[in-house]
Image (spheres, helix red, strand yellow):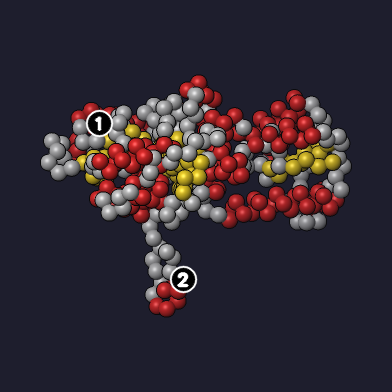
Amino acid sequence: MRKILEARSHVVSVFEGGKSRMQWVVERSAPDLMLVDGMCCDPHELEMVEQLTMRHPAIAVVLMCAMQTPEFLILAMRSGVREVLPSPPEPAALEAAVERIAIKMAGALAREPGQVVAFMPCKGGSGATFLATNIGHQLSMRRSVLLIDLNLQFGDALSYVSDLRPSSTVADVARDIGRLDASLLAASAVKVAPGFSILAAPDDLSRALEVKAEHIDTILQVAAAQYDFVLFDLGLRMDPLTIRVLDRADRIFPVLQPSLPHIRNVTRLMQVFKSLGYVAGKVELLVNRSANGTEIGLSDMRRSLGGATLVSVPDGGKDVDASINRGVPLADMSRSSPLCKQLAEISHSLSPRPKESAGFIGRIFRRA
């Protein structure tokens, strides 16, 4: 097998000593592909494989075993294995399997990872979910977007823009994390528009406990490889899951309203961000339902928050209520409203339109 693969210009290392050394091999060599020979239909051995693929989802694992039952193949795929081959494998089958995996890896590396954007309420009722879903919808008019509802206990982001029911949720994906790939992620999310999908929070509150911080790493890795933007609608809690998302986020949008309780909460939140080492440009405050003549103005808020970057979001009034109650994006109901225009501006700031080339060639290849 080594000669066959080296003939195709692959760099190969051979290790002996049993399947229990898989983790040691990964820590020592960090391979892109691991071929494991001598597997049997023992569920305990597949548990070792699953632990490996969960800790190192970027490593492709191929098993080789003399006997393959349908049950074993199903369990192997659920454990995160890419392929299962006979032992010993036919040279042509081995070459083809490695080539398929190499092509998939090359495709994943060639694509720029998607941007990660987190929306976080500073207080209950701040409007973070409305802004996250509707900015996501605006972004999806030009880019591919996945919104993940990580308000695990009371999340209802999907209902803001769709009346569809999810067949799978974040908890279901976490339960099958060992076999998560682009196809499973796409199938688990609800497609609410051509470029906009939402991975819903679980309906059962007890299922929220199944989602762990390490699951977020794997979900993000798969999602960022497939979507231009990965948006998170977070809850109020500052827990390990939330911090894991915030650490990975390119932009964080805390959402608040022009009131003293919101300002108190966001002041505490900004102190947490500072202690976590987040740079100033990573955090931008969205002041929702701002209006002229309110008792606390933007200038007052800037002074209270030490010059933090604030973006004013106007009150949408009855248009927002109608959008939420009908489960329809605001842009589909009231595109000309000041609120909808501001949401479009925010989405454009996240994904600026490319500058058009001058002249005839530029007009031909102008992007819509």
Q: Earlier along the polypeptide chain: callout 1 or callout 2?
A: 1
Residue drawn 83% across and 35% down? 68
Q: How far apart are the two marked residues, 1 and 2, measured between alpha carbons?
A: 46 Å
The x, y position of residue 338, in whole percent, is 24, 50
Q: Quadrant of residue 293?
A: top left
Q: Is residue 61 shown left or right of residue 198?
A: right
- Secondary structure, mark 1, is helix
- Label 1 with label 2: CB-CB less than 8 Å: no
The x, y position of residue 336, in whole percent, is 27, 54
89 is higher (above) or lower (below) than 256: below
Question: Is residue 345 in sight in this rendering?
Answer: yes
Q: Amino acid at mark 1?
A: His
- Secondary structure, mark 2, is loop
Question: Is residue 280 in sight in this rendering?
Answer: no
Residue drawn 71% across and 29% down? 48
Mark 2: give few (<14), some (14-19) or many (20+) Cα within 10 Å. Answer: few
The x, y position of residue 366, in whole percent, is 43, 69
User: In front here: 274 or 94?
Assistant: 94
Where is mark 1, residue-wise?
262
User: In front here: 319 or 102?
Assistant: 319
Mark 1: give few (<14), some (14-19) or many (20+) Cα within 10 Å. Answer: some
206 is higher (above) or lower (below) than 301: above
Residue drawn 47% across and 45% down? 192
Residue drawn 86% across and 34% down? 67
Where residue 321 is drawn, which disc sits there?
none
Q: Is residue 73 shown left or right of residue 217?
A: right
Q: Amino acid at mark 2?
A: Phe
Where residue 365 is drawn, which disc sits there?
2
